[in-house]
Image (tube, rainbow, N blue to C red):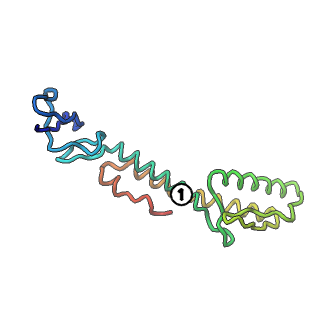
Amino acid sequence: MTTKYFVDDSGRFLGAFGDGSMPDAGAIEVPSAPDDACQIWQGGSWIWPLEILRARKTRALQERYAAALAAGMLYAGRRLQIGEPDQQNIATMGQEARWVLASNAPWPADFAWRMADNSFLPLADAEAMIALGEAAKAEVYRLRQVKWMHADAIAVATSVAAIESHDIDNGW
């Protein structure tokens, strides 16, 4: 039995047809089936449509951003956690430190921040907590800018080659 493969005029795969069966009129025979039904036939080969490549690259970018946040940042020679829940905790304590300063209230003498290695970083006063929060905020913002730069480049890419060759590992 001979199998033939066909696409429609937009390059979408119609299927494989054996002896005695034929696709609808107007179908174009191609030499092989795609590796994935989402691929389209273009220029003599199977390619991924831009929207699928863009979505995959964007998902990979989101994962890369999450990994950068999970890696944390160095602060006072130790690794500080800056993932989403950590950002909320840091912001809350930074706000508390600002209230301590504004109200001239005492800062706990034994206050320490738990670091990624489960050690504690002593923060002797409210200013020290605010400084930790500002450093974390700056690093998270820097990482967001890298993510946004990559997302913008992916969004405006007009070719398969441009999307495939965009290296989302740069800049972190």
Image mark count: 1
Q: Residues within 10 Å of mark 1 (few under 14, many from 20)?
A: few
Q: Residue at x 67, y 66 (%)?
A: 117
Q: Quadrant of the N terminus?
A: top left
Q: Position of residue 86 (x, y in %)?
A: 67, 54
Quadrant in which residue 73 is drawn:
bottom right
Q: Position of residue 120 (x, y in %)?
A: 75, 66
* Secondary structure type for disc 1: helix
Q: Which residue is mark 1?
A: 67
Q: Position of residue 8 (x, y in %)?
A: 19, 33
What residue type is disc 1 on?
Answer: Ala
94 in relation to 21, above or below: below
Quadrant in which residue 93 is drawn:
bottom right
Q: Residue at x 84, y 56 (%)?
A: 100
Query: Most extreme residue toward the right, as rendered?
Result: 105
Q: Nearer the viewer, residue 56 or 31?
A: 31
Q: Position of residue 67 (x, y in %)?
A: 53, 57
Left or right placement of residue 149 versus residue 43 in this view: right
Q: Residue at x 49, y 51 (%)?
A: 62
